[in-house]
Amino acid sequence: MDEDLVTSLAREIVEECAPEELPMFEATSEVFVADPDRVEKEVARDEMLGFGIETALVAIAPYALAIARHVVATLLEQVEAALAEESQGVVRDRVRALFKRFRGSQTATEDSPTLTTEQLGRVKAAAIAKASELGLPEAQGRLLADSVAGSLATA
C-alpha cells in the first residue's frame, strides 16, 4: 500500500472537511500507519485513538485515513486488473496519476490515466461503503466520498 498517497489523500480530505483537525493530523496518521487495522477497528467501535483527548465530537481524520486507504486499495485493484501485464511500479504510478494533486501542473493527455464516470461512481460507492462500515454518519460519509471524487482525474 502506498502510505504516502493514503496520508496525502486523507490530509486533503481533512483540509476540506475538518480543517480544525489539521494540528493533530500528523499524530493521527502516524498511529494509523503503524497499525491501520487496529485503528479501523477502534474507529468502527467508536473508541478514541489513545491521545487522551476527551471530546463528544466525531474526529474525521481517522475516518478519512481509513476511507483513503480503502479507496487507494480499490483503485489499485482496478488499475492492476486493467494493466495486469505491466509491472507493479507502473501500476502504482498510474494510480497516483489518477489523483490531481500528484499530477501537478501536467495536463491530461491521451496517455494520462483517467477514470470514467462509471469508475468514479464505483470509487464513491466504495468510499461511502467504507464510511458506513466504520460507523460514520451518512452525511459525513458522503462528504468524504465527494472529497475523494473531487481529487480524482476524470475523463
Image (spheres, rainbow, N blue to C red):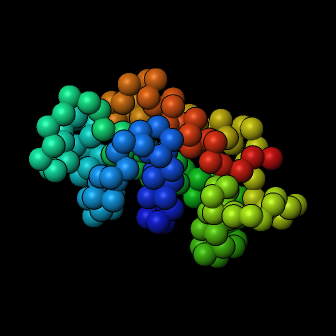
The residue lying at 51 percent from left, 50 percent from top is 12
Rendered location of residue 110, percent (x, y): 88, 61
Nearer to me, 114 or 59: 59
The residue lying at 75 percent from left, 59 percent from top is 113
Rendered location of residue 74, percent (x, y): 54, 50
Instruction: Please indicate whether residue 3 sits to the left or right of residue 96 in the image.
Output: left
Nearer to me, 66 or 82: 66
Rendered location of residue 26, percent (x, y): 33, 59
Instruction: Please indicate whether residue 38 sits to the left or right of residue 4 in the image.
Output: left
Furthest-right residue in this view: 110
Q: In which quadrant of the rendered view does residue 130 lie?
A: top left
Count the marks. 0
| Res. 128 visible in picture | no
Rendered location of residue 119, percent (x, y): 69, 42
The residue lying at 46 percent from left, 23 percent from top is 139
Q: Is residue 22 above or below residue 134?
A: below
Nearer to me, 68 or 91: 68
